Amino acid sequence: MAFTLAAQADNFNEVVLQQVQSMPQGGGYATTSSAHEALISAARIDGGGVRIQANRAVPSFCSSATYLVFLKTLGELQRRGIIQIDRAGWAALLPLKLADGEGVWGRWNANGPGTPRLFFELDLGRNFTSFEEARPGDFLKIFWTDAVGQNERGHSVVFLGLKQKDGVESVRFWSSNKPGGYGEKSVPRSKIARAIFSRLEKPQNISRLSLLPSRDSYLAGLLSKNSSFSEAGRMCGIR
């Protein structure tokens, strides 16, 4: 299928939102080993593509929820003929047992700017920090405090927009949220200390997977040490 990237860029966010709509509701939230096993069971290679059974990934956690949406988005774009991922590529994308910073899933699931770092390494799209530039369907890493790394408190979500309620600006997002699991939530914008958005603009660059180093030492190190938001931004190509 021929397409012009500039003309299609907005549609990639639409595809992300379509996958959000197709996800289950609820199911509970947990970060236990059984939740990780459930995630592994939800994705498998099927012929020339991937089969996602998100209803198997329960209970879920935030990064598992957004990663399934990412995989479903890639699968839909391949179905439409916009991108091509071979069997080896899908094998590299499966959410297997990987330490933080290892492989694709280990990057996405890491402390710090996991998703933005992956987007920067593969040039999948730009990373930015401005809520004013954000659009529904952007991936978003929320930092509840200024800490990045070992002591951080964060949340991996899909941005749905801003809303005003009783004079308070709130951020709407979808993820696996405590305690209910899959679903939409909103929080006052003032509760978010820092934010990094990642917009899927060049999904065809997923073909660069074979060039991705097996381990990202920056993300791997955030299990045991702290970074800073300025360093995180530099590591994600944010100027």
Image (cartoon, grey):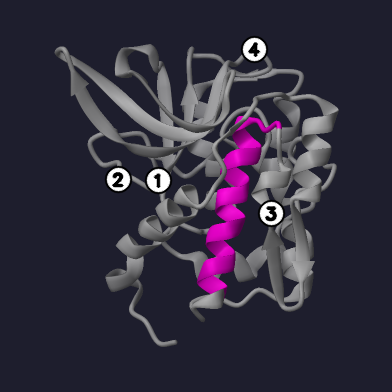
The kind of residue tagged 2 is Arg
Write down the residue under mark 4.
Answer: 151
Measuring 28% from the left and 21% from the top, which residue is drawn there?
Answer: 170
In this view, the mark in front (1 or 4): 1
Work out which residue is located at the far left of the displayed protein and give it. 167
Is residue 67 magenta-colored?
A: yes
Measuring from the top left, give residue 237's x and y in whole percent: 47, 44
Q: Quadrant of residue 98?
A: top right
- Circle 1/circle 3 CB separation < 8 Å: no
The kind of residue tagged 4 is Asn
Measuring from the top left, give residue 92's x and y in whole percent: 77, 60
Task: Tell me the quarter of the image containing the N terminus.
Answer: bottom left
- Residue density around tag 4, few if under 14, some if 14–19, many if 20 or more, within 10 Å: some
Dominant secondary-structure state across the stretch colored magenta? helix
Q: Is residue 194 left or right of residue 228?
A: left
In this view, the mark in front (3 or 4): 3
Q: Which mark is residue 53?
A: 3
Measuring 84% from the left and 29% from the top, which residue is drawn there?
Answer: 33
Q: Earlier in the sequence, mark 2 or mark 4?
A: 2
**Magenta stretch?**
59-78
- Residue density around tag 3, few if under 14, some if 14–19, many if 20 or more, within 10 Å: some
Q: CA distance from mark 3 to mark 2?
A: 27 Å
The kind of residue tagged 3 is Gln
Q: Quadrant of residue 18?
A: bottom left
